[in-house]
Amino acid sequence: MEITRQLAERIVDTRTERIPEAARVVARQALMDFIGVAIAGAREPLADILAAEIDAEGGHPQAQLMGRPGRASVRQAALFNGSAGHAHDYDDVHNAMTGHPTVPVAPAVLALAEHLGRSGAEAIAAFCVGVDAECILGRFAGPNHYARGWHATGTLGAFGAAAAAARMRQLDVAETATALGIAGTQAAGLKSQFGTMCKPLHAGHAAATGVDAANLAARGFTSRLDILEAEQGFLATQSECGSAEQWEKALAEPAYTQDICFKYHAACYLTHSSIEAVRTLSERHDLAPKDVADMDIRVDQGHLKVCNIPEPQTGLEAKFSLCLTAAMAMAGVNTASIDVFTDEAAQSEELAALRDRVSVAAHAERNPNSIVNIHTVDGHTYSEACNVAIPMTDLDAQWRKLETKFRALVAPRLGDTAANAIIEACHQLEQSDSVAPLMGLLRSADG
């Protein structure tokens, strides 16, 4: 199978007007959502460290650092904005990729579009192509890649960013295959880093890798043109190469972007179904923490290796704790707010007492639902199953939910006027001759 070449052909040959309208709408939503989480993440310690390193490196001011006053090279901006966008683990997800599709691709697209003077429509098309590439590979590689310990946002995301950057650079098929090869030999990210600053760095590194790959390919840098299917290539070393039939099925999907799922809790996505189930039971039966004798949660086996920190001590670890996030939901904590995931919350004696009454185990068989059973002190048992990993089809309602989330993230940083202006610019992005006006709105007056 000529997997790399066929993927490169799709990247190059996808006509903007053939991208489904729903995919283009969700692309604008995803870019807006990414900008919101990146501006919020620009205040985090990891962002301060990266900004200091960028200042020390120096470079041409080619693209805006989101939520900061400065500009940087395209590569530096992709690294910073991608890392900031994943700092709160509040960015979108995709089932086909088993990861976060927008955060490695959008930083590469927006930085290059700003630098190269590309239109909003070109940026949207490149974004859709990039998301398609990483999701096609995710669907083909299957869950084995993620199960082996690879963070798909960093690994598959590098291919997505390279695909989008190649599209922005208007590379031909051979050059695009080369860019995929350059990205593939650098694609990285280990799940053992979850709960540390390195997890968001995976996203930023993927975005920067994609930019580098396309830039080098455009200058004539060489690589294998079959990096995906080669012996000792990406799939052979990091996953299990599927069948020709599986590849054709993955490649045949017309657009993956429209199936992006957005996050409305500022924690690991695999905790969200449990959070929603606990909230539903709490509201339906008027339960308070004092009413809970114990709570058991059943999730898919894969969740236990991702978000099952039993006694988190930091706000970052709290995002990856099914027990604590369930306790927070029962206690009425607003898990949609990035401000509640603090070291103090992780170490709260009140929350810890409730957390310790929560047990987590895997379903006996594969099951996408989170099933929560709450046993009360007066002898009742209440159960609820939930699966949030289903894309919304009402895109107008999705706009409203995302705009509410966006304002909560951005208004405290840039003000209400700027937040509303960015929302409007994202709505109108496809009609914009340049992304520069949008990028100019993302600058903060201070660090």
Image (spheres, rainbow, N blue to C red):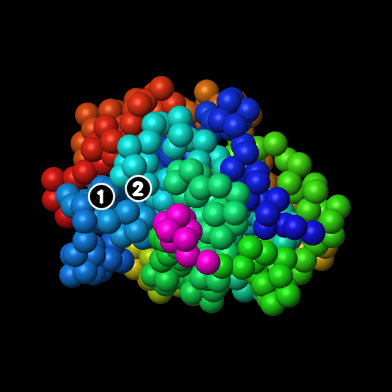
Q: x and y percent of residue 289 in the render?
A: 50, 56
Question: Residue at point 39% right, 70% down?
Answer: 197
Q: Nearer the viewer, residue 30 or 263?
A: 30
Q: Secondary structure at mark 2?
A: helix
Q: Nearer the viewer, residue 349 or 148?
A: 148
Kindly give the residue lying farthest to the front in the view shown.
220
Q: x and y percent of residue 212 in the render?
A: 42, 61
Q: Is residue 159 left or right of residue 367?
A: left
Check residue 428 for magenta coloring.
Answer: no
- Which residue is the site of mark 2? 111
Q: x and y percent of residue 413 in the render?
A: 23, 44
The disc placed on residue 431 is: none
Q: Nearer the viewer, residue 137 or 333?
A: 137
Q: Which quadrant of the structure image shows residue 422?
A: top left
Question: Residue at point 49% right, 74% down?
Answer: 193
Residues in magenta?
A: 214-222
Q: Which quadrant of the structure image shows residue 51?
A: bottom left
- Which residue is the site of mark 1? 62
Question: Mark 2 belongs to which amino acid?
Answer: Ala
Q: Secondary structure at mark 1?
A: loop
Q: CA distance from mark 2 to mark 1?
A: 8 Å
Q: Is residue 93 left or right of residue 339?
A: right
Q: x and y percent of residue 188 in the render?
A: 53, 71
Above or below, 360 against 251 in this view is: below
2 and 1 marks in contact (CB < 8 Å)? yes
In which quadrant will I find the C terminus?
Answer: bottom left
| Residue 302 shows in this picture | no
In which quadrant will I find the N terminus?
Answer: bottom right
Question: Residue at point 13% right, 45% down?
Answer: 445
Say whether disc 2 or disc 1 marks the residue closer to the N-terminus: 1
Question: Mark 1 belongs to which amino acid?
Answer: Gln
